[in-house]
Image: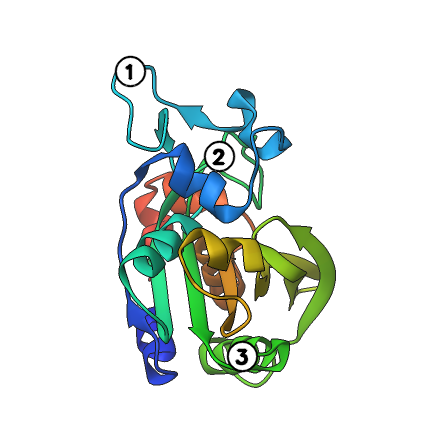
Amino acid sequence: EELKEILGRLGFNVADGPEIEDERHNFEALNIPASHPARDPLENFYLATAERGAGGPLLLRSQTSTVQIRVMEATQPPVRIISLGRVYRPDTADDTHYPMFHQIEGLLVDRKVTMADLKSTLRLFAAAYFGGDVHIRFRPSFFPFTEPSVEVDMSWHDRWIEMGGAGMVDPHVLQAVGYDPEEYTGFAFGLGVERVCARRHQVTDIREFYKNDVRFLRQF
């Protein structure tokens, strides 16, 4: 709720989408072709069901970016939304990974949107949630649905922790939803809610959030 409130002050509206998705919304419209390793059945939770969506086999969504596609399919620019919810990836559980976690996704599409707008938004968010002592950095990266792309890191004790990814919306994604990339640009970001919360409360292992240990939960 606090994340919604902070980004709401920056003009973002909340949008929701289904956790069971089809391949079009989870992959194809996000510029992730069939040959991409992210679509490997071993890297996703496909559903063993005869039912198929209009966009192909069904799976548990691996990212909240699917909501971006659904909103853009139904809305003309300008678009300024955030989406929060559960996502699923068959990761090995450790202090910073879990097979089910929560993401907060942001999307802004309008005329003349730049990388400077993205960086300013994330810095304002970090300062509002963590306070003035937070350090944030952006590392060049690659995601099929953004170009250019960056990893977003925040300092945590004596190390940097990857909080999520971000970048400018790839023109192919805009075309997939019927937007003219010559007229509109946009940025998107996705942050791990557990990692953000852990940084705020100095929790060193995100698995603590799922153990249902009352002694841990009573701290909050």
* Residue 1 visible here: no
Q: Is residue 48 above or below residue 190?
A: above
Taking the spot 27% from the left edge, 59% from the top edge, the residue there is 74
Circles 2 and 3: CB atoms closer than 8 Å:
no
Q: Position of residue 60 (x, y in %)?
A: 37, 33
Amino acid type assigned to the residue bearing label 2 in the image: Arg
The Cα–Cα distance between marks 1 and 2, rounded to whole angstroms, is: 19 Å
Taking the spot 61% from the left edge, 48% from the top edge, the residue there is 144
Q: Nearer the viewer, residue 142 or 29?
A: 29
Q: Nearer the viewer, residue 96 or 139?
A: 139
Tell me which label, 1 or 2, sits earlier in the chain: 1
Element assignment for label 3: loop
The Cα–Cα distance between marks 3 and 1, rounded to whole angstroms, is: 41 Å
Amino acid type assigned to the residue bearing label 3 in the image: Val
Taking the spot 36% from the left edge, 73% from the top edge, the residue there is 77
**For residue 165, which quarter of the picture?**
bottom right
Q: Residues within 10 Å of mark 2 (few under 14, many from 20)?
A: some
Q: Nearer the viewer, residue 84 or 205?
A: 84
Element assignment for label 2: loop
Closer to the observer: label 1 or label 2? 1
Closer to the observer: label 2 or label 3? 3
Quadrant of the image for the N terminus? bottom left
Q: Nearer the viewer, residue 83 or 158?
A: 83
Task: Name the mark on residue 89.
Answer: 2
Tell me which label, 3 or 1, sits earlier in the chain: 1
Look at mark 3 in the image and give the residue it sits on: 113
Look at mark 1 in the image and give the residue it sits on: 49
Taking the spot 50% from the left edge, 64% from the top edge, the residue there is 188
Q: Position of residue 140 (x, y in %)?
A: 74, 61
Q: Position of residue 200 (x, y in %)?
A: 49, 67
Amino acid type assigned to the residue bearing label 1 in the image: Thr
Tell me which label, 2 or 3, sits earlier in the chain: 2
